[in-house]
Image: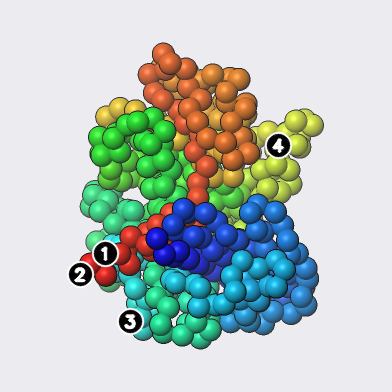
Amino acid sequence: MIQINILVLNSGSSSLKYQLINMENENMLAKGICEKIGYNDSAIHQWVHGKQVISKNVGYIKNHKEAFVYIEKMLLHKSNGVINDISQIDAVGHRVVHGGEFFKEPVIIDNRVVEDIKKLIPLAPLHNGAHVAGIEACKVLLGDTVPQVAVFDTSFYFDLPEKTYMFPIPYEYYKKYHIRKYGFHGTSHKFVCNRCCEISGKNFSKEKIISCHMGNGSSITAVKNGKTVDTSMGLTPLGGIMMGTRSGNLDPSVVLRMAQCESLNFEEINEILNKKSGVLGISGISSDDRDVVKASEEGNYRAKLAHEMMVYQITKYIGAYTAVLEGCDSIIFTGGIGENQWTHRQKICDNLKFMGVKIDSKLNKNIVAGKEGKISLEDSSVDVFVVPTNEELAIARETMSFLKSKNQT
């Protein structure tokens, strides 16, 4: 079999993450990041076979085009690289957060696709603009002969029922401005749901699953018979449960009252809700859950409160989604917090004892740091799993599958 190498890119506003994956055996050849793009202390890091081989500050990286030049150099590095020539990259898969109502599935990127992604920047201002920058940088350096594929976080939710995705506001705002629920983290939720069924030997198309992606950004998704029926994030990734710095859902009057009391404009409100709220806002310590755990263990009241609120909200969503699904076969924990903070999992599952959820405390403590597996007891009414997410591999698979289907038509 001819080796097919797919480069997966995840462009942030000031970062460019990448993985190069050999699709013959799905082996990650290298991964890395260019961070603090646009700042004077830009840095690059690369790992090969899980070992960090490059880590250095490089001064000022002006934009994503310059960042991609560094990525090319790192992949081709004489002693720490993994390919001999850039032509060994056969395709590029781009993570794109918001596909709106334009994109139901992955697409080959052309000028029309780029323009449609740009149209969606107002719905994902922190993400889609950066994705376009990554796409354009990639095209400049790789040319038109290397296919680029966009894989959208929102596509997993494209078929949400209308009663789920509509907001109870004047209907004209949906028709005029496409204001509706879109959902995010779809690539992650789809990956872990499928992996969960592989582990358990169950049929994804016949299962009722609640997937909890818990990280600095968090979302919960309900899946029935292979289709999403609801998800916590809404028009943007701000909705749903409280997150590292994001508020999650609020009574709209909270926003109006804050603006009135503090004489805040739209930009200031947006800054508060996206970057100063959530776990950071309540704890006053950090958006990093590890710091908040440490403070909570040391007796910090606000840190403890932040965790109590988070556990409560996740419990509430699982209960609501169990009703929506008319039962639940499996609950999945994934994401940085879901995979590693066993104490949060324990508290959430303890709250679900009324559903017959029973977990093995020893297994729960042991399944962290990249491990996967079932943590519920055999007599638990609901199976509970920890499944590490791998969005990069999921994007590479989607890219590979899409290219194969196009070659066959």
Residue found 72% across the figure and 68% down from its top: 79
Element on which disc 2 rests: loop
**Lateral position of residue 263 relative to residue 91, left or right:** right
Q: Residue furthest left?
A: 409
| Quadrant location, the N terminus | bottom left
| Residue behind mark 3 | 112
Disc with the residue nearer the chain's start (3 vs 1): 3
Tag shown at residue 293: 4
| Residue behind mark 2 | 409
Element on which disc 1 rests: helix
| Residue behind mark 1 | 405
Give the Cα distance between marks 3 and 4. 46 Å
Above or below residue 193? Residue 148 is below
Give the Cα distance between marks 1 and 2. 7 Å
In front of the other: label 1 or label 4?
1
Element on which disc 4 rests: helix
| Quadrant location, the C terminus | bottom left
Residue found 62% across the figure and 27% down from its top: 366
Residue 236 seen in the figure: no
Neighbour tally class for label 3: few under 14, some 14-19, many 20 plus, Cα within 10 Å: few
Residue found 46% across the figure and 46% down from its top: 219
Residue found 57% across the figure and 36% down from its top: 371
Residue 5 percent coordinates (x, y):
48, 66
Disc with the residue nearer the chain's start (4 vs 2): 4
